[in-house]
Amino acid sequence: MAKTFLLGTLGLALLVASAAPGRAGDLVADAVMPLLDGTALAGGLLPQPVEAEKATTAQDTAATMLVPFEQSAGAFTLSGEDAVATFTFRLDGPQVSAGGVLNLAYINAVSVLPDTAKVDVEVNGREIGSFAIAAPNGTLTQTIAVAPEYLRAGRNVVQVRARQHHRVDCSLDATYELWTKLDPALSGFATGVAAPFTDFDSLLAVRRNAAQRTEVRVVVPGASGAEALNEVAPVLQALVLFLNRDDVTVSVADRPGTGPGIDLVMAMDRSGAGVLSGLGLSAAPRGLSVQAGASPDRAAVVMRAAGLGDVNAAVLAAVKGPMADGLKSGIFEKGRGVITVDAGERRTLREAGYQTRVFSGRLSRTEFAVEMPADFYPAEYATLDLRLSAATSPGLDQTAQLLVRVNDKVVKSYPFRNRAGEQFDGKRIELPLRAFRPGANRVELLAELPIAADAACRPEERDDGKPRFILLDTTAIEVPALARVGRLPDLAALAGKAYPYGGGKAFDLVIDRADHQSVGAGLTMLSRLALSARAPLNARIAIGAPAEGTGRDALVVASQNDFAELGTADKAAFPTTDDIGASVADLLKPDTLVTASVSGAATGNETADLLQAFHDSTAGGEDALSFGDRAQRWLAAATNSFGRWLNYEGEDATRLSPHDKGSLVTLSQMRSPDGLATWTVIKADAPRDVEAGVNRLVEPAVWRDLQGGTAAIETAGLALVSLPAADRYIADLSDRSPGNLRRVAAAWFSDNFQIYVLLVLACLGAFAVWLGLMVPKKGVRSDR
C-alpha cells in the first residue's frame, strides 16, 4: 500500500513550522552606542551577575532526578576567549511549579587563567547566575538554583557564556588552547519531582546511554520481514523527527532493551495479544501511545494496529495532535544557529539566534550554519555576499583583520586598516560560491584583534572594560541566483538534505539480509536521512537485492559473503551477536604475517595494484625522461594543483580504494546498472561491521563531513576518509529556464577550465584565420 500519509505529514509539519522570524531593522549606530556605554541588553550583554551556589560533586546531586539537555555531546565544548552554547531541556507543569537546580558539570583547560575566567548563565532569556571557571584538574559540578518564575512548561532554553583568557601566552594561536567542556552525563536540570513517561512530550527528557547516544530499540516479534519493517518505518521516522536528536541509533530485537532509551514496540494484530501481555503492556490502547518502560529511565512507544493503513492513520493523528507542539518547538524551531537560504534571499545573523555582543579579547569567533539547496551547483559563476555590520575600536594593530572560514577552510580575509577605528554599515564581503556545498555549511567569522599591549602579555593589566570589536546581529548574507541542477554522486547533499531521497520522492531501502544488525543499520540510516530532510522519507523497504529497470532510486545496505552459506531460506535466522566471529575487535588485531601472491583468484583491485607497483619499480628517473614526457607530467601536475586550489583542497588529499581491507564500512553513490536511477550503497564485510560502521557514520561530527563520491570508516582508528567523485552525472534538472541553463553552463566551464581555455584559444585562432583570409582581399582601391 502506498504511504499516502507521508506527503500529508510533510505538509502538516511545514504548516506547524510556519512562524516567521521578525526582521532585523536596527542601524549600526543605534546598537553600538548603548553597548559601548555599558548598557546591559537582553541576551547576556555586559551582565550584572548573580553569584551561583557553591560547587558540589556529582554524588551530592545523584539523589535527585536529572533532566538532561537535549543536545548531543559535540555541543558541550566552549572554546576560545568568548564562547556561547545553547541547550534545551523539557519540564512538565509540576516540575515547573517546584523549581529546581541547574547542574553544570565541567572541566577546563589548564591554560585558562582562573583569576578572570567566568561563566554567565541565562534561562529563557533571563540571567540566573555566574561562577568562576576553576576546574583544570577534574570535573566540578556547579549548581544554580532556578525559581519557578524563570521556567516554563515544555522546552526551556539555557544559554551558557564562557569568557576565558590564557595564563601566559597572549598570541592569537594561544586562544585555540582555551576551552571549557561540560559533561553531558552530569549536566542538566535537577528536580525533586519525577515525570513518568506517559505522553510524547515526556520522551524529550529521555536520557542517553553510556556511549552518549539516544537509543531507540525496535521490538518486532518473529522474523524481521519486509512487511514488518515497512510498518516500522513511518512510526520510527515520526519519533526521530519529534525527538530532534542527531545522535539516535536504532537497534532491532524481539525483546525490550535495558538502561536509558526508548523501546518502539510493534504490536500488530497478526502477532496476537500475547506480545503486549508478555511485555506488561497489555493496557496500551490501539494506535500510537507512550507507556512506562521496564525501568524508570526507559520509555515504551507502542503501536497497536491491524496493518500498514492503520499505522499510517495513527502516525498522522499523532503528528496533528500530541506531537504538534514538540515538532514546532523542536526540529522546526528557527534561530538555533542555522540559516536556511535559497536563491535571491537575504538572511541576518539574528535569524540564526545570534545576539549582538561586544568583544574585548584578541580573537572573536562567531559560528553559524548556512543550509544551501540540495540541487545547488557550487562553482565560480557568482559570489555569496556577507554584509558586515560591525565596528572596531581605536588602537588595533595593523595586522588586525576579519577572516571568513567556510567548512573549515579560510576563503576570505578583510583587513581592518583604520587604526582610529571603523564602523561597517553593511560592508560587502564577497564569498566564493565554490566554497559552499549543498546542505549544511559551517561558517565562522574570525576577527583577529591584536593591540600593542598584547606583546607585553601582562594578564593582571588586562582591561576587559574596553572592547575591541562588536558584531551586530544585523550582519547578513545575500544569496545570488544559483545554478540548480542535481549532480551525483554527492555525499554532502546526501548528508545535508537527504538528496536524492527527500521531497517525498519514492525510493527503495534494500537490506540484503534480514538479521537484526543489518536491519538496525538500515533503519539508523533512514532515521538520520529523515532528520536531514526535516521530513519523513517515502521509503519502501525490501529484503534481498535492488531491482533493476524500475527507475527507482535505492539505498542499499549490504554485507559481503562472510555468511553466504546460510542461504536465502535461513536469512531470518542469522546468528546472534555472540555467535559472530568476524567482529570489529578481530579486525583490529594486527596480522602476524603479511604475504603477497599472484593467482588466478586475484581481484581486479589487487591486479591493478600489482601492475602499478611493477610500473613504479621499473620507471626511469627524471633524467631519463624525454622533453615531451616531462612537459606532460608538468602539465598534469599543474592541472591537478589548480583543480585542488579551485576546490579548496590541500596537497595531502586522502585517497582510498572502494572498500579496501582497511575499511570497516564504505558509503558510495553510483548509477544503477541500467542507468535509470541512483544507488547509495553501504557495504561492509559482515553484519556486525555494517552496524558498527553506520553508527560511526551517523555521529554528528562525522556526518557533517561527508563529501565526495565515496566515504569510508577506517577499521583501525574509525576515522572518516573521503574520495572525490571521479565522474558526476546529472540526476535532475527541474529548472530549464534560460537563466538557469546559462548559470549551469558557466558553472560547468569553471569546473572544466581546460575546455574553456581551449575554446577561447580556438575562437582566437578562428578569428586570426578569418582575419588572414579577409584582409588581403581588401587592398587599396585605385581608379584607372
Image: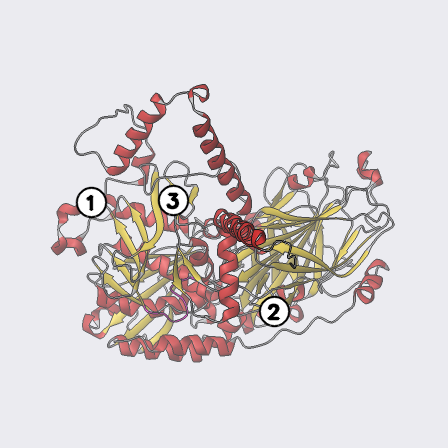
**Residue type marked 3:** Ala
Taking the image as shown, residue 236 lies to the left or right of residue 344, namely: left
Residue at position x 28%, y 65% in the image: 551
Task: Out of 625 and 318, give the one closest to the viewer.
Answer: 625
Residue 193: tell me if it is visible.
Answer: yes
Here the colouring is: secondary structure
Asked if disc 1 and disc 3 are in contact, CB closer than 8 Å, the reply is no
Give the Cα separation between the discs numbered 1 and 2: 50 Å
Task: Out of 523 and 625, give the one closest to the viewer.
Answer: 625
In the figure, residue 91 lies in which quadrant? bottom right
Q: Residues within 10 Å of mark 3 (few under 14, many from 20)?
A: many
Per the image, label 1 sits on a secondary structure element best described as: helix
**Residue type marked 2:** Glu
Q: Which residue is mark 2?
A: 345
Q: Which residue is mark 1?
A: 561
Per the image, label 2 sits on a secondary structure element best described as: loop
- Span of residues in magenta: 498-506
Quadrant location of the C terminus in the rendered image: bottom right
Q: Residues within 10 Å of mark 1 (few under 14, many from 20)?
A: few
Task: Out of 757 and 708, give the one closest to the viewer.
Answer: 757
Q: Position of residue 351 (x, y in %)?
A: 63, 67
Residue at position x 34%, y 70% in the image: 234
**Residue type marked 1:** Asn
Point out which mark residue 384 bears. none
Give the prevailing secondary structure in the magenta stretch.
loop
Q: Which residue is mark 3?
A: 712
Give the Cα separation between the discs numbered 1 and 3: 19 Å
Comes first in the chain, label 1 or label 3? 1
